[in-house]
Amino acid sequence: MFDVFYKDQINSIEDACKLCRTRYLWILDQHNDYSQFDLAWEPPPWEASQTHVWPSQHQQHGGTMLVPKQGAVVQNYNHSVVPRVKSAHRLHIKHTVSSLDEGDINTRYISNYMDTMRRALSKTDWEYCWVTSDVCTYTDFDFTWHPSEWQQDMLHVFPSNEQKFGDTFYVHVPSFLEKTKNLEVLEWFETLNFVSEIPVKRYLFGTVKYNSDSLVEAVWNHQFEQPVAMFYKYNQAYAPTISLWQEKLKTIVPLTKGGEVTLVPREAKNYLKTQLYDYPYINKSHRNQLPGKPVDIVFISNGESNADRNWEHLCKCTQNIPNRVVRVDGVKGRAEAYRAAVSASETDWAFCVFAKLEVAPGFDWSWQPDRLQAPKHYIFHAQNPVNGLVYGHMAMIAYNKKLVMSNQAQGLDFTLDQEHEVIPVLSGIARYADDPWIAWRSAFRECLKLHHSLPDIDNEWRLHQWLKVNLQGDAIGDWSICGAKDAVDYYDSVQGSFDALKLTYEWAWLEDYFTRRYNQSPDQLCTQLLNQ
């Protein structure tokens, strides 16, 4: 019988050889099962000077060796498996306070894995340990796994699902504490070993169904118990496995084009003020998981001469898309028409297409409002065929239904009175100069607002174009210029009085003002031009 030494009782094989009193010495590992092992075994003479190494079920070197007292250069691995049956100690990290205690030591996750592990492991005398997490299930995990002999002081990382930076670690505690003394993030650890062939299943995080127009309110109202939650408006989506190693890796992940379904980490709520973009870490690479619920399209008309033509053009452009298309016609009053339009919509936002707009055939109707922001209106661009300007005037607007219904129309511009964003995408051509009255009316209203906004370098240039340019070179284009000039004259005559400017909000007032100014009604003007 040869002398026996257990690995955790010696500093080195050399030290064990010095203490040995027999020709050979056994080096054994306390985690292995030696109940069926023959400790009386001795190598044949031609292998007598070799070190004999027995594998475990996991590694070629399983921690069992027969070593000649005089030492050996050659190692012989031609031996049967000695099963490893015991596990190293286990530190269990809890992201959710109420989750079960599953480790020898259980600790609460604080901020990041590195600091959480350092805080707990510095209080132990363990040489090796497992670090596990309550976000994963270990029902089928084999905790008898161990690294190969030359990987002993590495930090071994097991993926969570497809996430390389997983939540399960095998740690050589002394070297981990030493190597992380001045480390800022765990990713910089000197010797990381990613055990990609042994993934660990992560639990699905909780889901939150919300009814608000944006995620902001939903996140505010949610009490996070888990590190991440999936917020969804209509349908859930496949969720990628995000890393929990440090805060900047715990990203907000929109899973649809407009963020109807979004993964939100618990930390994001601490940053939230007015929008989810207050949180600096957002990953938009998964936005095409689902297309998002198609936004309804509402065509708004009220006696425009080209309304039917533009309506037919819209129907032709949208015949192969899933969006619902409806028409609202003949509603008196601008604000009332907008409210009627969104009331006809079954979605939280509606593409409102005004009768003067000939929509661009290639417009992307799959566009979605950004639910990571607070609710707002979205103003697209339109091309003005008279003065060549391309900006938001007469363009399609994606109106938020709740905002429209609460809008009291107190300012000069219904849309700009509330939160809004300009989307520099061409929605079509504003065919307002097919009719002299519509041309005058549209120019008058727009130039009144432009003049009121001065000084503004962009609006000053736009006003100049309205007042001077007629690319069409016809009489109707001239009536557009007249409307622009009349607006400036009216503004100056009332000295910018808001009450006087507010009168121009309604079509009836504009029609009466035009009749008094030109001694003819809009209908008479149109008839006159038709007879020329």
Image: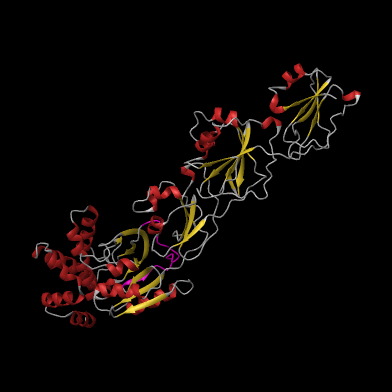
Side of 305 relative to 158 (left or right): left
> Observer-nearest residue: 438 or 529?
438
Magenta segment's dominant SS is loop
Residue 7 falls in which quadrant of the image?
Answer: top right
Q: Quadrant of the C terminus?
A: bottom left
- The answer to which quarter of the image holds residue 364 is bottom left
Q: Position of residue 26 (x, y in %)?
A: 79, 26
Whole-percent x, y for residue 516 in the image: 11, 77
Residue 216 higher or lower than 351, as above or below? above
Describe residue 476's horizontal placement relative to residue 515 as left or right. Answer: right
Compared across the picture, whether 34 is left or right of 408 comes to right
Lateral position of residue 148 relative to residue 201, left or right: right
Q: Which residue occupies 79% across, 37% down?
A: 82
Q: Is residue 208 magenta?
A: no
Where on the picture, by quarter, is residue 523?
bottom left
Q: Is residue 370 visible?
A: no
Residue 425 seen: yes
For the record, the magenta segment spans: 356-373
Q: How many marks?
A: 0
- Residue 370 belongs to magenta span: yes
